[in-house]
Image (cartoon, grey):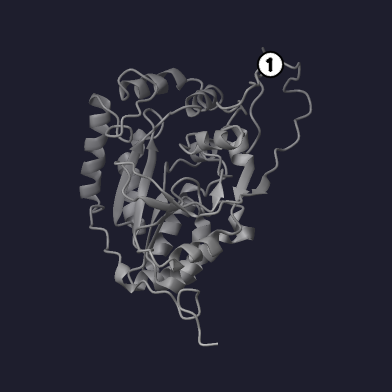
């Protein structure tokens, strides 16, 4: 069977049916070869998400926050390893190419957040932006939903944290900088590799590594505390970069660091294996073997206590190397305290109506 590569500029190599669908699609050899005309470029479609609330809650014991905001479902960055991919199956779409080409936006997000803040029962608590999909992905350039969300946080003086791998966050320094001065903002930049070729193959529409380092630098210069997240660490692909990546992030101004070992739940495993077969065929078997060594011999272990770090000698070695590099490059500084006492409902809001 002739192998035909996946769409250019996309991470997933297939569009396998989601696990909740009644019928399954299966790829087959249709006779086309590399010499034939390429298939049409896969375009992004943006659909409206009519959610009635914007603050999501979780009770995961291994996550440092229990409230988050995602202005989009799906993500154009196309990171093949993205743990959010399986969520697209809930809406009847594939966690594969659909996840990165069928994006749901939440145009009512700013109004929904203001409505939540105005409830008499609301008490300020940590909120993370971008915990599931990137809030500054390419469609944000035109829609500006995340920017308008930040304006609500600023107006209500509500602290906010964020994580992104997009340089577009720098557009919003006019909001984030003043908030950080008041102890109301801090961020994290996801930096998986310094290797431009690996980054392009694995995260096709995300910012290049040097742009992410520059984003760390500019956020730091604007007074926004920045953590670098090496997520995920993938044995035999980027684990050799732990020390050099943390050194570069520290030099750019990051004050903290964290990591997650590659997770392959549900549909992600087959998507990642397919990506390896096309993009890293010579090392595919070794990569999967090492991953299983960190997961008790399986492709994935969902145990809360170990899903982000793995188990076994290799997982322990990665943890020890990361800890040592953090200390060496002074990336173990305490996170600044967020000031929740400043929260107030502005004059003129429904909770604080004007006189007329």
Between 101 and 80, the residue placed more toward the observer is 101
Q: Badge 1 is on which residue?
A: 28
Residue 238 x/y as whole percent? 39, 35
Work out whether 154 lies above or below 203.
below
- Judged left or right of residue 341, residue 106 is right
**The N terminus: image quadrant:** top right
- Quadrant housing residue 264: top left
For the image, the number of numbered tags is 1
Work out whether 187 lies above or below 268. Answer: below
Would residue 147 be visible to someone looking at this image?
A: no
Query: In this view of the protein, which residue sits in the foreground, 322 or 265?
Result: 265
Residue at 54% across / 65% down in the picture?
Answer: 148
Q: Nearer the viewer, residue 214 or 272?
A: 272
Q: Residue at x 31, y 21 (%)?
A: 293
**Horizontal side of residue 248 vs 69, given as left or right:** left
Quick check: can you spot residue 179? yes
Q: Judge the density around disc 1: few (<14), some (14-19), many (≥20) Cα neighbours within 10 Å.
A: few
Q: Position of residue 16 (x, y in %)?
A: 60, 26
Q: Is residue 258 above or below residue 237?
A: below
Secondary element type, mark 1: loop
Q: Residue furthest bottom?
A: 355
Q: Is 317 positioned to the left or the right of 53 in the image?
A: left
Q: Residue furthest top?
A: 1
On the image, the x and y values in percent for residue 192 come to 42, 42
Image quadrant holding the C terminus, namely: bottom right
Q: Residue at x 30, y 34 (%)?
A: 304
């Amino acid at each position: 069977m002739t192998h035909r590569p996946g769409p250019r500029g996309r991470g997933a190599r297939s569009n396998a049916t989601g696990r909740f669908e009644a019928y399954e699609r299966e790829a087959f050899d249709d006779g086309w070869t590399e010499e034939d005309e390429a298939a049409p470029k896969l375009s992004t479609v943006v659909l409206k998400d009519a959610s009635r609330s914007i603050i999501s809650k979780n009770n995961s014991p291994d996550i440092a926050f229990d409230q988050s905001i995602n202005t989009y479902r799906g993500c154009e960055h196309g990171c093949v390893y993205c743990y959010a991919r399986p969520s697209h199956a809930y809406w009847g779409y594939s966690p594969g190419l659909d996840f990165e080409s069928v994006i749901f936006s939440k145009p009512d997000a700013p109004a929904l957040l203001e409505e939540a803040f105005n409830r008499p029962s609301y008490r300020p608590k940590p909120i993370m932006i971008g915990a599931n999909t990137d809030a500054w992905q390419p469609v944000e350039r035109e829609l500006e939903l995340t920017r308008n969300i930040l304006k609500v946080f600023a107006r209500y003086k509500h602290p906010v944290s964020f994580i992104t791998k997009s340089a577009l966050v720098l557009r919003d320094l006019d909001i984030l900088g003043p908030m950080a001065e008041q102890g109301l903002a801090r961020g994290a930049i996801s930096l998986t590799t310094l290797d431009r070729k690996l980054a392009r193959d694995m995260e096709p529409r995300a910012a290049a590594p040097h742009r992410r380092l520059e984003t760390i630098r500019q956020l730091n210069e604007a007074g926004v505390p920045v953590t670098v997240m090496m997520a995920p660490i993938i044995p035999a692909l980027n684990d050799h970069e732990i020390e050099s990546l943390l050194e570069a992030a520290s030099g750019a101004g990051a004050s903290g660091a964290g990591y997650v070992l590659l997770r392959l739940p549900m549909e992600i495993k087959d998507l990642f294996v397919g990506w390896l077969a096309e993009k890293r065929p010579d090392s595919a078997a070794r990569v999967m073997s090492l991953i299983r060594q960190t997961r008790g011999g399986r492709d994935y272990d969902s145990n809360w206590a170990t899903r982000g770090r793995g188990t076994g000698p290799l997982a322990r070695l990665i943890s020890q190397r990361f800890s040592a590099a953090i200390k060496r490059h002074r990336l173990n500084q305490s996170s600044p305290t967020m000031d929740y006492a400043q929260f107030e409902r502005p004059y003129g809001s429904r909770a604080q109506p004007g006189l007329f």
